[in-house]
Amino acid sequence: MAQTIGILTSGGDTPGLNAAIRGVGKACLSHYGMRIVGIRDGFRGFMEKRTMDLEGDALSGILTLGGTVLGTSRDKPHKMPVNGKLQDMTGVIVANYHALGLDGLVCLGGGGTQKNALRLKQAGLNVVTLPKTIDNDVALTDTTFGFDTALGIATDAIDRLHSTAHSHHRIIVVEIMGHRAGWLALGAGIAGGADVILIPEIPYDVGLVAQAIKTRRSKGKPFSIVAVAEGAISRQEFEAQQLSSAKKKDRKPKEPVAEPELVYAERTLRLAHQLEKLTGLEARVTILGHLQRGGTPSAADRLLATRLGTAAADLLQQGRYGVMVAARGEASEPVPLEDVAGQVKLVPQDHPWVESARGVGTNFGD
Ligand code: F6P
């Protein structure tokens, strides 16, 4: 009998999700003759048994679309707000999996989704995942789809900010998404030629950033672009965090903390204000926000999402479950969910991108 596969997208949306849904779906349907059921709005929709027909023409014309035709949510199976309370809905999801006649489930998501998928595997479901996020912080995969598109958008923004910063002799502080990881700010900062790049993995000293800007001015460059990752943090604040977490014994030392967006924005505004005071130059702030996640996926993301999506279908056909399809060079590789879940891929301080940026004179505030 033909296998029936469920597919859902979970966590923040990402350009390339529709390309991946199409890749999984077309390969399952046409290549392997399976049945495919779309599950709406991530684990929330799974708990509520809301589905979408992906057969017929549903997978046509979505390759180039941003967002996800399935909808998404940040809900977790084991901690879902229901009737005003956080409840463990894993049992309901498992029951719905069987009620829908599913033989396998493909979950498209970032780090959180890998953890949730592992829990469902442990509850007995046949799960395969794909790594998506603009943050590029999923462990054990070369990269994630969505990252390349966001990198292009953030780089384009830095390019555009250059001319206005130059005209007004200003500092422009541009905040770039990435949550706890600095990949996006680092990549876009290098590609856009930012003068300063601040990432969570390298806590900064604002005095050193100001000094770098003043040195530029003394060399006849009275404007500067500061690319700051959402999670970037000053040394002082980082040390205070380390102290408090050591007291609470709640976190591995030296790991950046995930904060709400408002905290990121407050830090970015404070940084711009401090730089104004320390340099005597005017500063302006641009927060790129969700622009970085919107719109048409890049060619590289469509290609990656299609490659990983069709590889997921191959694994389902072989009955290889409990894995994430990782990008490995030109190919892909299944990695056990146990190895991926709970891991974050941060920027190593001596990563070649950091070294290259330093090579062209970029300041990291350290
Ligand atoms: O993980 C992707 C991401 O865009 C992060 O870069 C950002 O911190 C977060 O999601 C924003 O989340 P939300 O869309 O829920 O506001």
Image: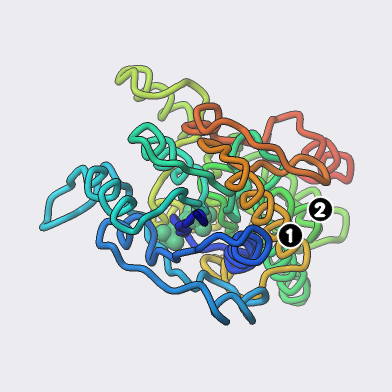
Q: Name which residue type carries label 1.
A: Ser
Secondary element at tag 2? helix
Of the pair 347 and 363, the residue shown nearer to us: 347
Give the answer, above or below, for where 51 lies relative to 340. below
- Residue under circle 2? 216
The residue lying furthest to the front in this view is 1
Residue 224 tag number: 1
The x and y percentages for residue 219 are 88, 54
Kindly tell me whether residue 284 is visible in this rendering.
no
Of the pair 17 and 275, the residue shown nearer to us: 17
Q: Nearer the viewer, mark 1 or mark 2?
A: 1
Q: Residue at x 86, y 41 (%)?
A: 356
How many residues crowd around disc 1 within 10 Å: few (fewer than 14), some, or many (20 or more)?
A: many
**Would you say the beta carbon of the disc 2 residue lies within 8 angstroms of ligand 1?**
no
Disc 1 and disc 2 in contact, CB within 8 angstroms: yes
Q: Residue at x 67, y 39 (%)?
A: 141
